[in-house]
Amino acid sequence: MTMRVLGVMMLLLITVPAAAQPLHYWGPLSTDTATGVIEAGSEVYSVRVGDVIPGHGTVRAVSDEEVVLVYTLSEAEKLDLSNRGQAVIDARQVHIRNVHRLLPQPERVR
């Protein structure tokens, strides 16, 4: 990995709120492709563009491939980045890939 990629990964890890649970995206609903299905811990939610997921951000886009969130950093988070000597950002955009797209596809039987 290049140093730039490692730097971006570290920045994302540092700016993730400690209380936020990992999210898993299961894709859009079969009956409404503008609505996606998100799993956070043991809870499952349906989300649409504009919905706010506490601790993760606002839904910017929903597609078959991914859900895109924009998380706006608080002043305390910005100050923490500054105190660590890191680049201070106002927001981060997170792309969460569809879990089904990440799973290996079964081999076809001939």
Image (spheres, rainbow, N blue to C red):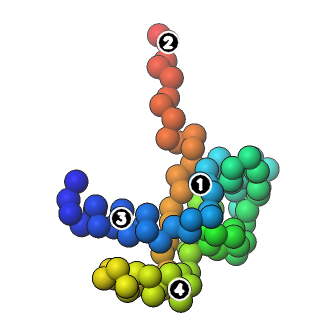
Q: Amino acid at mark 3?
A: Met
Measured in 3D between alpha carbons, the distance from the residue under mark 2 to the one under mark 3, in whole angstroms, is 42 Å
Density class for disc 2 (Cα within 10 Å; few <14, some 14-19, many ≥20) is: few
Res. 22 mark? 1
Labelled pair 4, 1 in contact (Cβ < 8 Å): no
Q: Name the foreground residue: 95 vs 30.
A: 95
Labelled pair 2, 4 in contact (Cβ < 8 Å): no
Mark 1 or 2: in front is: 1
Rendered residue at 74%/46% (across/down): 42
**Splitting the image into 4 quarters, where does residue 84 fall?**
bottom left
Question: Residue 48, relative to residue 97: is it above or below?
Answer: below
Question: Residue 71, relative to residue 98: is it above or below?
Answer: below
Q: Which residue is mark 3?
A: 10
Measured in 3D between alpha carbons, the distance from the residue under mark 4 to the one under mark 1, in whole angstroms, is 22 Å
| Precedes in sequence: disc 2 or disc 4 | 4
Q: Which residue is mark 2?
A: 109
Q: Which residue is mark 4?
A: 76
Question: Residue 5, relative to residue 26: is it above or below?
Answer: below
Report helix, strand or loop for mark 4: helix
Farthest right residue in view: 31
Q: Amino acid at mark 1?
A: Pro
Rendered residue at 24%/66% (across/down): 4
Farthest left residue in view: 2
Measured in 3D between alpha carbons, the distance from the residue under mark 2 to the one under mark 4, in whole angstroms, is 55 Å
Q: Amino acid at mark 4?
A: Ala
Density class for disc 3 (Cα within 10 Å; few <14, some 14-19, many ≥20) is: few
Density class for disc 4 (Cα within 10 Å; few <14, some 14-19, many ≥20) is: few
**Splitting the image into 4 quarters, where does residue 100 fall?**
top right
Residue 99 image point, x, y percent: 57, 44
